[in-house]
Image (cartoon, rainbow, N blue to C red):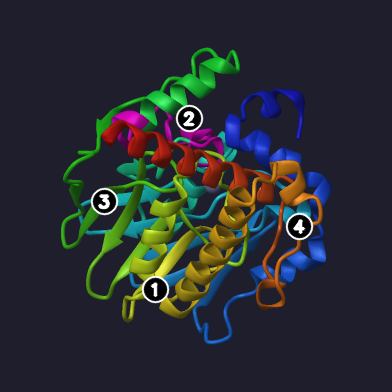
Amino acid sequence: MNRRNFLACSSSCATWMAGIAAWSPAAFRSVMRPQAEDDREVLLTEKWGRIEKIQDGVWAHVSTPFETRDYTTVCNGGIIAGDKGVLAIEAFMQPKGAKWWGEKAMELTGRWPTDVVSTHFHGDHTGGHKGYFTDKHKPNFWLTNTTKEDAEKSFSGRGMKGNEFQNVQTIDAENGTEIDLGNRKVTLKPGSGHTNSDVTIELADPAVVFCGDLFFNRMFPNYGNAIPSRLNTYAKTIAATKDTIFVPGHGPVADAAAAKIYHDFLGWVENWATESITAGQTVAEATKEFKLPTQFEEWFVWSPDNAKKAWTAWDRELKLADADMKKSK
Ligand SMILES: [Zn+2]
């Protein structure tokens, strides 16, 4: 990655970069393999990821940045096509990633995306937004107000001028927003847990949910801005579903069984962190010999900071809960 691209990253991108030292491409390949029961068609494999068909008119991009050290997309994404419009999910890390996804939409559906949504403010989901805009194409760009503000703060914190979002449409942070693609309606549903403003993209019948980073499948979640108890609640909810396909923000496409394992993983992280905090340990003490238990051995720890950030997020949440208790007494 050259200097300009590096500067074009925002906060979470730096986190990804910090993870480089921890990589093991072979381990990543094993994590990213499609699930055993998976019979989805893989349409195309690029250096940075693959495209899987989810159902008629719905495709997922599964990003595989660790195998080849290619940061064109970094996060997963989606395309949902109706007879009046085409929604592209995520703006990826780099403009060339978004441009590539726009071109794929064109090939798969015959149209450039009419609408684009980013699930949260992190740079690997917003950094490439300009790639969707050309002389000919000006899609609606769907964001919550919080996501827009936090992303722009993060851009300007890095001295990135002229990187404002174009054609922004605001997602209703209370009730969500429905996008009418003609013969198909898509719900942009607000939530929180990975950040304080996350959005999932939901289709009914057959049910498909693009979870953004509320779901990391087979990879240690990024807890940098997380509200961990809410993350747990989200995982519990999706683990209890039936016949839904989940496209996580990172990691392979999943079903409820995989969501259940994710929920168990988050529960294990909660126990590990809160026991250590209650015992009065520091983050350095807690993470000194950090190791995942055998049942999650396969899970990909992509940065040496993964455990530290999880511990810190739980510490932050417990302190806030304490302060609230004191206030109410
Ligand atoms: Zn992400």
Query: 301 left or right of 39?
Result: right
Q: Which badge, 4 or 2, is on the more N-terminal residue?
A: 2
State which mark lies toward you, 2 or 1.
Answer: 1
- The residues colored magenta run 122-146
Q: CA distance from mark 2 to mark 1?
A: 35 Å
- Determine which residue is flagged by label 1: 239
CB at mark 3 closer than 8 A to ligand 1?
Answer: no
Q: Give the amino acid type for the residue marked by disc 3 in the picture.
A: Lys
Q: Which badge, 2 or 3, is on the more N-terminal residue?
A: 2
- Determine which residue is flagged by label 4: 290
- Determine which residue is flagged by label 3: 189
Q: CA distance from mark 4 to mark 1?
A: 27 Å
292, 12: nearer the viewer: 292
* Residue 178 image position (x, y, % from top left): 18, 50
293, 329: nearer the viewer: 329
Q: Give the amino acid type for the residue marked by disc 1 in the picture.
A: Ala
Q: CA distance from mark 2 to mark 3?
A: 24 Å
Q: Which badge, 4 or 1, is on the more N-terminal residue?
A: 1
Q: Which badge, 1 or 3, is on the more N-terminal residue?
A: 3
Q: Quadrant of the N terminus?
A: top right
* Residue 123 image position (x, y, % from top left): 54, 35
**Element under label 3?**
strand
Q: Give the amino acid type for the residue marked by disc 4 in the picture.
A: Phe
**Element under label 2?**
helix
* Residue 316 image position (x, y, % from top left): 51, 38
State which mark lies toward you, 1 or 3.
Answer: 1
Q: Mark 1 and 3 residues: CB-CB less than 8 Å, in contact? A: no
State which mark lies toward you, 4 or 1.
Answer: 4
Q: Mark 2 and 1 residues: CB-CB less than 8 Å, in contact? A: no
Q: CA distance from mark 1 to mark 3?
A: 18 Å
